[in-house]
Image: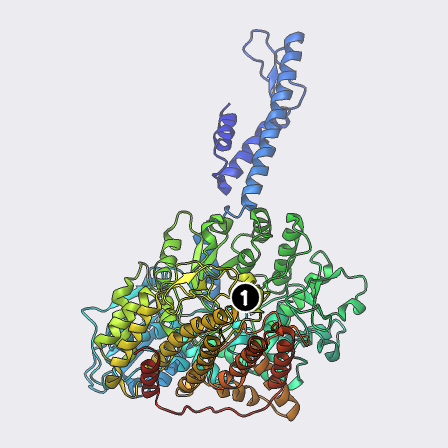
Amino acid sequence: MCLTTLLTLKLRKPAKLLSLPELQWVVIALLLATHQGEDQEKAPKKGRRSGTGKGKEAGDGSGLFCPDNASLASLCSSFLNQAMSTLASIFFILILTQSLLLLSPLASSSPETIKGLLTRLDSQKSSASVQESAARGVLKRLLPTHLNSFEINIVSKDVCGGHSCFLIENYHSSSQSGPQIMIKGTTAVEIASGLHWYLKYWCGAHVSWDKTGGAQIDSVPKPGSIPFVKDEGFIIQRPVPWNYYQNVVTSSYSYVWWDWQRWEKEIDWMALQGINLPLAFTGQEAIWQKVFKGFNISKEDLHDFFGGPAFLAWARMGNLHRWGGPLSQNWLDQQLLLQKKILSRMLELGMTPVLPSFSGNVPAALRNTFPSAKITRLGEWNTVDGDPRWCCTYLLDPSDPLFVEIGEAFIRQQIEEYGDVTDIYNCDTFNENKPPTNDPAYISSLGAAVYKAMSKGDKDAVWLMQGWLFYSDSEFWKPSQMKALLHSVPYGKLVVLDLFADVKPLWKISSQFYGTPYIWCLLHNFGGNIEMYGLLDSVSSGPVDSRISKNSTMVGVGMCMEGIEQNPVVYELMSEMAFRSEQVQVVEWLKAYAQRRYGKAVDQLQAAWEVLYHTVYNCTDGIADHNKDFIVQFPDWDPSLGSWSDNSKQSQMHKLPTLSGTRRFMFQQTDPNLPQAHLWYSTEKVIKALKLFLDAGNDLAGSLTYRYDLVDLTRQVLSKLSNQVYMDAVTAFRMKHVKAFNLHSQKFLQLIKDIEVLLASDDNFLLGTWLESAKKLTVNSWERKQYEWNARTQLTMWFDNTKTNQSRLHDYANKFWSGLLEDYYLPRASTYFTYLSESLTKNESFKLEEWRREWISFSNKWQAGNKLYPVKAKGDALVISRALYKKYFD
C-alpha cells in the first residue's frame, strides 16, 4: 500500500522527474516485494492470524500468503497475480516515463547544462599570462602612448559570482608615471571590453571600424592625467554568457580579400566590443581538400565543387558549385595559413572560435567513387536557367553510413591542423534549400546524423545553427518540422541563432525554440549594402525582453549582419547589450554617443542624431531592409506596359512599399504597378538633420568620423531624392510628356554624377580599395584576372545571366562606391533612358529586350575589365556636401 501510494503520487506529477536516489529506492522496493518469496523459502513459514494455523503461500512466488481454505486461496492467488501484474505495469510506465522525460529537451535544467558547457570551455582557454599579454597587445595597438597607464589582470569567475565580468578600479601607485587604472577580467576579452568601457565613459573616446571613421581617441587625456573612477571602482557582469559575431556569408561580402593586417584589426575590434564567440570559417577548403583525398576525390574533382573566392559562402552551403572558380593551390595554402593566425589570436584573447562542420554537401565525383551511396541532387537556387555547370548541388543522405564517416573525418582533420581549439561547430543544412521531404522522421534523422558526425570527431561537440531557414522558408518549417530538427540532438548540444530577432524574433512564436538554447541576434544588413538604417529601440530592448521572458532559453546576444563597415551606431549599441541587463534609454545614449564619436559636444549634431533616431533609425514597418534605391538597383521593366514585376531574389524575400509620385518625396504609396523602394521615414526631417550636420562642419575640420557620417548622410538624402526623380521620369514617359521626361531623366543622371563626386571625397567609399585588396592576394596573372572578376561580379551581376536575362541576384550586393556609380550605374541608367526617349520621339514601343541585350553585354565586359580605380580620396567633403545641399534643397 505504501509503495502503491508512492508510485501514485509520483505519477500524478509527470512534469517532475524522480531524482536518481528516488528512482533507486522505488526499484529496490519493487524488487524486494517481487522476490520476497525466495527469502521466505529459507525461513519457517508463519501462518496468518486467521485461526487455521499454517497459511498457504500464493502460487506466484511473490512471498505473499493466502489462507489454506481452497476457495479463498484460489481467489487470493488470482487477486495477488493481478496485483503484481498491475504493479509491474506501473513499474514499466514509471521507467518509460522517466526515460522519455530524460530524453525530452526540457529534462535538463538549461542553466545547469549551459553552465557545464561553459566550465568545459573555460578549462580549454589559454593561460592567464597568455591572455594578459594578448590584452596588452590590444591596448598597445589602440593607444600605444598609454601602455603604462593601465594594469591588467585575469581573475577567476568566482570574483564575479560565477559569471564573466570585468572590474575597473583605481590603481594606487607612488610613481606618477606608473599605472593609474586597474582593469580585471575573467578573460582577455573582458579586459579589452573593460578598457573600451573606461575609454568611452570616462575619457569620451570612440572606436569603430576604420571604414566608418575609425577611432576617435583625441579626447583621452595624456598619460598621468587620465581620470580615476569613483570610490572602489565598479564591476560589470555579462547577463548572458555569449556574444556571437558574424553571418556565414560575411566571409564573402566583407572578409574575402583580407590579409593578416586587416584581420588583426578586426579581432582587436571584436575584443573591444566583448565578442567571445566568433565564427572562424577561413581556410576550410584546404581542410576539405585533405579530407576528400582520403575518399579518393582528386584536386581536379574539387575544381567543380568549390566556388570562386567571392562566392565560397554559398558553395559551402550547397547553393552553388564552381561559380567563380576554380580555386588555386595558392589560395588554399594562403587561406589555411591565415586561418591558423586568426585562431591563434582568438585563443590568446580567450575567445571560443566556432568552426565549420559537415552538412552533407558533397562533390559530384563522390557518386563515382561510392556508386552505392545515397546521393541526391538538390533543387535550383537563383540561376537564370538551371545551368548544371553551377546549379543543383549534391547532398549525401544522412542515413548513409558515409555521412557520419565524412563528417567525423572533417572534424578530426581540423583538430589535427589547429589543435583542440573549440567544441562548438556551425552547420546550416538547408540554407535556402528545402529538404527532399517534410517528413519529421527524415528531418530528425538528418539532424541526428549531423550531430553524430560532429560528436564522433569531438565527443564534446556542440552544434551551432543559424535559424534563418525557419524564417526564409517558414511555409516548410512548420512546428512539427522545427521540433524534429531541434529535438534530434541531445539537450544542450544544439544552440540556435535567432538570426533576425531585431525585426522578426522567432523565439516569441516558437516557444523559445521549443526549449532549445538560442542567441538573440541582430541581422540588420543584407549584401553589405550601404544604407543608413536600423531599429535602435529593438536593439536596446529586444535582448532584455528575451532574457527575462518566461521560460527563457536565451544564452547570448549576437551580430549576424551579411556585411560589416556600415551604420556604426547600430553596432556600438548592439555590442553594449552584451553587458547590459536593463534597457537603454536611447535618446540619452545617443547624446553621449555623438559627443564620443566627434570628440566634443556639438549642439547641432546632438539635435541631428535625435532626428535620425526618430526617422532613419526607427524602421518599425517590419520590412527587411535591402537597399533597392533605383541608382544601385535599377528597375528592369517596360513602363509602357503599366505593370511592374520583379523576379529578383530580393523582391521575393522582402515586401517593400513604394514612393510617392508627387514632386515632393516625403510620402509613400502602394501602387503595385510601379517599381518599389524602401522608405520608412519623413525625408523632409532627414534633410533638416543634414542641414544641422552642415552647420556643425566648421567646428569639426579634420574629424574622420564626422566626415564619414556627413558623406553617408548626404548620400542617403540624395539617393532617396533620386528615387522620386526616377518616378517623375517614368510618370512623364507614361503620359508621353517628352519635355518633362527629358528633364527628369537628365536630373536622375546628374544625381548619379553628383553622388559620385561626393563619394570620391572620402577614402571609405571607393571601389578601388575593394579591387586592389583582391589583386594584392594574387601571385600570377591568371589569379589576378580571376580575383578581379570575382570582386567585380559579386558587386554587380552576382550570378549567371543569358544575353537577354539579367542574373536573378543582380545588384544584391550593390554598393555606393565612387567608381561604381560613374562606370557602372550611370551607363546603365543612361542607356535605359536613351531607349525610352527613342520610344517617345518615334512613337513606338519600348525595346526592352534590345536594352537588356546591350546592357548585359556591357556589364559582362565591365566584370571582366581591369581598369584601375583610385584608392585615395579627392576633394573636400564638407564643401561638396554644402554645394549639393544648396543645389537640391536650399
Is 84 on the left or on the right of 594, as rendered? right
Q: Which kind of residue does numbered mark 1 sit on?
A: Gln
Residue 301 seen in the figure: yes
- Numbered circles on residues, count: 1
Spot occupied by residue 52 in the image (x, y as percentages of width and height): 59, 7
Above or below: residue 174 compared with residue 487: below
| Residue at disc 1, secondary structure | helix
- Judging depth in this view, the residue of 376 and 817 nearest the camera is 817
Spot occupied by residue 269 in the image (x, y as percentages of width and height): 40, 77
User: Within 10 angstroms of label 1, few (less than 14), some, or many (20 or more) residues?
Assistant: many
- Judging depth in this view, the residue of 24 and 275 nearest the camera is 275
Q: Which corner quadrant of the image does residue 429 belong to?
A: bottom right
Above or below: residue 171 compared with residue 112: below
Q: Which corner quadrant of the image does residue 668 belong to?
A: bottom left
Above or below: residue 42 compared with residue 512: above
User: Which color scheme is applied?
Assistant: rainbow
Which residue is labeled 1 in the image? Answer: 650
Spot occupied by residue 180 in the image (x, y as percentages of width and height): 23, 80
Which residue is painted at 71% across and 76% down in the image?
302
- Judging depth in this view, the residue of 551 and 166 nearest the camera is 551
Which residue is painted at 31% across and 64% down in the image?
614
Spot occupied by residue 746 in the image (x, y as percentages of width and height): 46, 81
Image quarter hosting the C terminus: bottom left
